Image (spheres, rainbow, N blue to C red):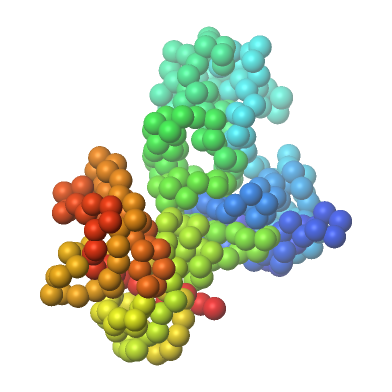
């Protein structure tokens, strides 16, 4: 058996002259939760539909656990999908919804309902089998949709924007439920979202897509700490992208000319020269303007208290910087002169 749950090799999906997915290759590990992340129109949902067999590739090869499924229908792939709308049958109770796929597949109703009850219990829905979907909370409906998919014992489970219909607090709880379930059962999951925090929170691996291609692929921390370019840096959370001159960066630390001053900062090894740099808001320290430690001079244009953190916009010679500090750190009023000290910078590819 292949160690990849899903493998794309040179896959393209064209709709007329438009290539929604353009010569994409990747291998998604078995037993991992892999998120396809990107803005609207980047190709992530089309990629998910290609895995599911809802669309067939124009070119290239798609494998599921080492088996070529490129020309197979959705029903032949042993894939289950949890849709954005959940797609529960409103006239059926929970037990009937979960057992539906087994019954349609030829299982006896009694056996199908027995398996469905066991799956409901596994997902914390025991005792809710007689309720209609409308009598459940949004989080419960989400778990019913997952139970209906899992009872079919799919090789790969697909999620299409599964939390978009939930409020912010419930989204966090349900995404934790999905992640816990995936880990506990060792499921191979492909998960689509446009929400960066969601992707960071649940994923083993993130595939950032742009214009039908893969912009970068890696663990959440790899993509956050070492984005390949300005697009990935900005999409994987807030980032200040500035122009600077690397004076020397042998590895670990660097001297960088930024806005007319030289600052020392953490940076991976990089050749000297002019380039774009990404600075995360939380990696910038704000000091009083007369602090002997030095830094990039600036003026606070906006200051906001958010409970656990404070947010600032600081005007500097390198551009407007967005800065986030802990609420316990010294506060700076709007109009205050400050020094910005970036603890870490990431060089971006051209």
Extreme residue in the top direction = 130
Q: Could you tell me residue 28's position as x and y percent?
A: 55, 58
Snapshot quadrant of residue 6: bottom right
Extreme residue in the right direction = 16
Direction from residue 86 to residue 310 in the image, left or right:
left
Q: Could you tell me residue 85's position as x and y percent?
A: 62, 29
Snapshot quadrant of residue 312: bottom left
Direction from residue 124 to residue 70 in the image, left or right:
right
Q: Could you tell me residue 279's position as x and y percent?
A: 37, 67
Q: Residue at x 25, y 40 (%)?
A: 307
Mark yes or no: residue 31 visible: no
Q: Could you tell me residue 127's position as x and y percent?
A: 44, 13
The one of 220 and 7 positioned closer to us in this rendering? 220
Extreme residue in the front direction = 335
Q: Is residue 200 above or below residue 223?
A: above
The one of 287 and 88 positioned closer to us in this rendering? 287
Q: Residue at x 68, y 60 (%)?
A: 212
Q: Is residue 45 above or below residue 105?
A: below
Quadrant in which the C terminus appears? bottom right
Q: How many marks?
A: 0
Snapshot quadrant of residue 317: bottom left
The one of 190 and 213 positioned closer to us in this rendering? 213
The one of 146 and 169 positioned closer to us in this rendering? 169
Mark yes or no: residue 312 visible: yes
Quadrant in which the N terminus appears? bottom right
Q: Residue at x 51, y 68 (%)?
A: 230
Q: Is residue 300 above or below residue 79?
A: below
């Amino acid at each position: 058996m292949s160690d990849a749950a899903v493998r794309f090799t040179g896959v393209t999906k064209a709709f007329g002259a438009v290539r929604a997915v353009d010569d994409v290759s990747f291998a998604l590990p078995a037993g991992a939760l892999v998120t396809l992340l990107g803005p609207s129109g980047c190709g992530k949902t089309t990629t998910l539909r290609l895995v599911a067999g809802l669309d067939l590739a124009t070119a290239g090869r798609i494998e599921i656990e080492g088996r070529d499924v490129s020309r197979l229908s959705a029903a032949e792939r042993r894939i289950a999908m949890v849709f954005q709308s959940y797609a529960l049958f409103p006239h059926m109770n929970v037990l009937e919804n979960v057992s539906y796929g087994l019954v349609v597949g030829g299982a006896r109703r009694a056996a199908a309902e027995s398996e469905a009850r066991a799956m409901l219990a596994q997902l914390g829905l025991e005792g809710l089998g007689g309720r209609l979907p409308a009598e459940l909370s949004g989080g419960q409906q989400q778990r019913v949709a997952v139970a209906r998919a899992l009872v079919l014992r799919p090789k790969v489970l697909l999620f299409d924007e599964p939390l978009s219909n939930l409020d912010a607090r419930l989204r966090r709880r349900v995404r934790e439920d999905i992640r816990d379930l995936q880990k506990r059962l060792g499921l191979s999951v492909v998960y689509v979202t446009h929400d960066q925090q969601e992707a960071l929170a649940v994923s083993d691996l993130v595939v950032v897509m742009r214009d039908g291609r893969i912009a970068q692929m890696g663990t959440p921390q790899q993509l956050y700490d070492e984005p390949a370019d300005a697009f990935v840096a900005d999409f994987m959370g807030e980032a200040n992208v500035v122009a600077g001159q690397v004076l020397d960066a042998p590895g670990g630390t660097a001297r960088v000319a930024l806005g007319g001053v030289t600052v020392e900062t953490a940076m991976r090894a990089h050749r000297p020269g002019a380039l774009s740099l990404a600075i995360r808001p939380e990696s910038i320290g704000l000091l009083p303007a007369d602090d002997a430690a030095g830094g990039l001079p600036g003026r606070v244009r906006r200051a906001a208290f958010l409970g656990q953190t404070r947010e600032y916009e600081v005007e500097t010679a390198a551009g407007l910087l967005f800065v986030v500090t802990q609420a316990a750190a010294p506060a700076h009023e709007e109009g205050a002169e400050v020094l910005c000290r970036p603890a870490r910078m990431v060089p971006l590819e051209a």
